[in-house]
Amino acid sequence: MGEHSEHGHNDHGTEFPPHIVEQWAGLGLDLPALFSAGALGRRMGVRVLTAAPERVVGTLPVEGNTQPYGLLHGGASAVLAETLGSVGAMLHAGPNKIAVGVDLNCTHHRAVRTGLVTGVATPAHTGRTSATYDIVLTDEQGKRVCTARLTCALRPAAQQGAAEPATSG
């Protein structure tokens, strides 16, 4: 599981451009697992469809992610937005850095009761130490549901093979 072909597709359904697959190849990392919403995203049904530093696209089902009125939960929109912006920031940062979300802003424009929400993250700023992504979420009719902005700090990644911390016991 987690393997990808020479075309940048994998069994998670995420499509990566060939230069990204090549850049991350041979590092012993599961690219689709790293560039996903993790356990929370799996529970919520988040899917990252395409992932590149300049554009990340993903979806979230409304069903199972609603608040008591039966509307898409604003926190679910935030999870999709943070996931897509984080993936973009991580891809921009490259394999020698990690991206850590430090600020997320979401403005909710309209209620959604059914269907699939699609999010598109594009860079507003990409630098050496931070990356900011604008994320637009739309419903199945293409109407804007939420506008979000995520800023990630870019930090050096832990060295491969670094000594594990000692544990007492």
Image (cartoon, helix red, strand yellow):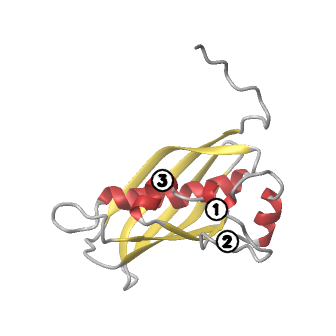
- Report the side of 66 relative to 2 (left or right): left
Q: Residue furthest bottom?
A: 141
Q: Give the residue drawn at x 33%, y 55%.
A: 75
In the rendered image, residue 33, in percent from the top left (x then y), is placed at: 61, 57
In what quadrant of the picture does the N terminus appear? bottom right
Q: CA distance from mark 2 to mark 1?
A: 7 Å
Quadrant of the rendered image containing residue 123: bottom right
| Dot 2 and dot 3 residues touching (CB under 8 Å) | no
Q: CA distance from mark 3 to mark 1?
A: 13 Å
In what quadrant of the picture does the C terminus appear? top right
Which residue is the site of mark 2?
A: 10
Quadrant of the rendered image containing residue 112: bottom left
Amino acid type at mark 2: Asn
Amino acid type at mark 1: Pro
In the rendered image, residue 18, in percent from the top left (x then y), is placed at: 79, 71
Q: Secondary structure at mark 3?
A: helix
Q: CA distance from mark 2 to mark 3?
A: 18 Å
In the rendered image, residue 119, in percent from the top left (x then y), is placed at: 47, 70
Which residue is the site of mark 1?
A: 32
Q: Give the residue drawn at x 69%, y 74%.
A: 9
Which residue is the site of mark 3?
A: 39
Q: Secondary structure at mark 2?
A: loop
| Dot 2 and dot 1 residues touching (CB under 8 Å) | yes
- Report the side of 45 relative to 152 (left or right): left
Q: Give the residue drawn at x 69%, y 59%.
A: 31
Structural crowding at the residue carrying mark 1, measured as other residues with C-alpha within 10 Å and reported as few (<14), some (14–19) or many (≥20) = many
Q: Is residue 169 above or below residue 104?
A: above
